[in-house]
Amino acid sequence: MFEDRLKKLRLARGLSQQETADALGLKVNTYRNYENNEREPNSTVLIKLGKYFGVTLDYLLDYHCDKRQENIRKENNFTNKEEQLINKYRALDEHGQKIVNLTLNEEYERCRYIEKPSVIELPFSLLKASAGSGDWLDDELFDTISVQDKPEARKADIVIEVDGDSMLPEYANGDKVFVRLQPSIFENEIGIFIVNGSGFIKKMGKGELISTNPEFENIPINNYTELKCVGKVIGKV
């Protein structure tokens, strides 16, 4: 019956009778009478109800529609929760639907990386951070590595393997890290550096390169230090 379907639509959205009446521009007693079958809405109100709840007038008025809606739900494998979300989405204005679409697309892409991982190839340094020497950007010192396609990988220019435990607990011996090539990094950011010809993974500090593992000493930076920043560490492979 009409009053049952109306109440079902309202409860599916978690709305009170007062909230629904306010949204429709009705007095709460008038709306309450619709649900109690004590008053019939005119055509203008019916159109408002259909538009607000995202359903057709046939659904509101035709007693066969309950069965038809149930068949549609079964055909599309909709759960009650999914149906509630659809109804809420239909009630949003253009701006609200745009915000939901942006969030939905972002989360879909994030989960797609997790559920269906693909791979991309990046240059892989043959010199390890903390042990190498020489020019780290020489093409002859790079191989190729296949890594999972994810946001950090797409931002990276190269991959470097960590040698040693000076950056524990975040980076351990044997870890491979994504590096974005850039000539400098900000204080407290972790980067790859060449210090007097040797490569290191360290945190940028004031006048020194910091080891996060207290068992290892920091590297002081002074006028006699040959220092070059290779790039910023943006994540772990």
Image (spheres, rainbow, N blue to C red):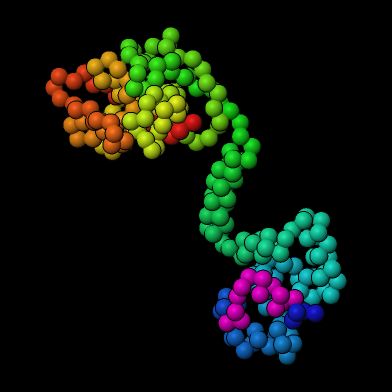
The residue most toward the left is 223
Left or right of residue 224: residue 6: right
Rendered view: 10 above or below 207: below
Start and end of the magenta stretch? 5-18
- Residue 138: x percent and y percent? 39, 11
Residue situated furthest top in the rendering: 140
Horizontal side of 113 relative to 68 (left or right) equals: left
Residue 229 at least partly seen: yes
Q: Based on the picture, tell me whether residue 11 belongs to the magenta stretch.
A: yes
**Total of numbered circles in the picture?**
0
Picture layout, residue 33 above or below residue 79: below
63 or 119: which is nearer to us? Answer: 119
Q: Is residue 88 above or below residue 197?
A: below
Task: Tell me which residue sits at (23%, 27%) in the image.
Answer: 219
Residue at left 70%, top 84%?
35
Quadrant of the snapshot with the N terminus: bottom right
| Residue 175, image quadrant | top left
Find residue 70 and report its horizontal and vertical position in percent.
81, 65
Q: Position of residue 108 (x, y in %)?
A: 59, 45
Q: Position of residue 21 (x, y in %)?
A: 60, 80
Residue placed most toward the observer, 129 or 36? 129
- Examine the image and state in which quarter residue 113 appears: top right
- Residue depicted at 18% across the width and 20% down the height: 225
Confirm whether the magenta stretch covers residue 17. Answer: yes
Q: Main secondary structure of the magenta part?
A: helix
Determine whether, in the image, residue 221 is placed left or right of residue 36: left
